[in-house]
Amino acid sequence: MLPEFYQFQLSTKVLYGPGLALDFSHELHELGASRYFLISDQVIQACGLVDGIAERLQEEGFTITGKYLDVPQDASVTCVEAIAAQASQTGAQGLLAVGGGSVIDAAKAANFIFTNGGSLIADYSGAATLAKRLKPLVVIPTTAGTGSECTLAAVIYDQENNTKLSFSDKFLLPDLAVLDPQMTVTMPSLLTAATGMDALTHAVEAYVGVDASPHSQALGQLAIAYITRNIAQAVENGGDLTARGAMLIGANLAGISFSHSMVGCVHSMAHAVGAVARVPHGIANAILLPHGMAYNLEECQEAYAGLAPLFGADANGRHAGDAARMAIESVKKLTAELNRICALPIRLRDAGVEKDMLPLIARKAEEDGTAIYNPRPVTAEEIMVPLQNAF
Ligand SMILES: [Fe+2]
């Protein structure tokens, strides 16, 4: 059945190629900026990924006006304000982000203030607060997970109120995303597994969400295939550029997909587990994905059955219900394999969650903004079942 209405827009130019992070300067000419402020974090800096890019751009006649290398694990309002102030003070014309989702989100949010001034929280919280384009933003992801390089959202931690703020606007989409698998080879195996499972969750949830469209589903399907076929190899052999490249592409496709049709109950639970027990986002999603899929089984039977071959399940000739259950089993097998390779937790109890936390987690999951996009209503009472199963 076709949706009554949907829209699809991607203004980000995507470039893919091994080694491209040191060879993309010709693409900057069409953005009209020659002075860039560089944003990253200490881990990426220590891996030596930042300086090489900066030096190469300077050789090509661009100016790096300054660097902010202290983006924390959860990009904060304080760091966003510092980035915007330093970029302005140094006379930058555009921003260049090198890092994972937190670094990219920090750069996206900083661009609000860098371009237009004002207060991040008071002026830009929520959705569609902008009337025109922001200054040029170029992003080079170093993880294959969030897909933030091609999403219209940014999540920033408000440390004063201990809450996460969401910003969403089509003008938040970066102008240029450079996907270079060599930028992800230094990622440790557990982080590769967790971020990859986050991306897989984006693809699955976007595919079955209430706002899914043919465009978002097409990208979601391809993302599932790329990720399930390559994640174990990327985790086991981080230097495999083919597996790394496929993961980067899969995460990007999943990002574009969920940027158009949102995520559902797995993310509702993962956000709650993150808030209550500080479980990292990707690990929470990895644990919860098969259980969230089971929660939606009745509503999504046909969809899961269609996805089964992409998960590697041989469901030929099976009834939809059987094929759907095989798809869920395939996800469980995948996480069990990742557990074997890199000790990825596959139960909430192994990730620091206590049993008496589950009722609070269930209530927070019901209240989470993603719950309304789930194909089955998320109530605190009913979502206890997958939480208990995942425990
Ligand atoms: Fe996610």
Image: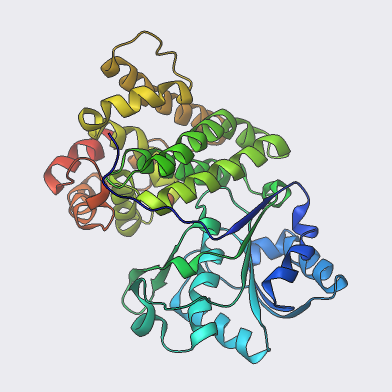
From the image, which quarter does the N terminus lie in? top left
Task: State whether residue 145 appears in this view.
Answer: yes
Residue 102 in the image, given as x and y percentages of width and height: 51, 63
The percent position of residue 186, horizontal first and vertical second, equals 69, 49
Judge from the rendering whether residue 98 lies leftward or rightward of residue 17; answer left or right.
left
Percent from the top left, x then y, of residue 128?
A: 36, 71
Between residues 155 and 73, which one lies in front from this camera angle?
155
Percent across and percent down for residue 123 are 37, 83
Q: Tell me if residue 353 comes above or below residue 111 in the rendering.
A: above
Residue 155's image quarter? bottom left
Q: Is residue 32 above or below residue 179?
A: below
At 61% from the left edge and 73% from the top edge, which residue is drawn?
A: 136
Tell me the residue at 56%/65% (across/down): 174
| Quadrant where the C terminus is found in the figure | top left
Q: Horizontal placement of 100 versus 321: left or right?
A: right
Q: Is residue 207 above or below residue 124?
A: above
Image mark count: 0
Observer-nearest of 287 and 298: 298
Residue name at image x 31 percent, y 52 percent: 273
Q: How is the image coloured?
A: rainbow
Q: Is residue 240 in view from this perspective? A: no
Relative to 30, 355 lies left or right? left
Quadrant assignment, res 149: bottom right
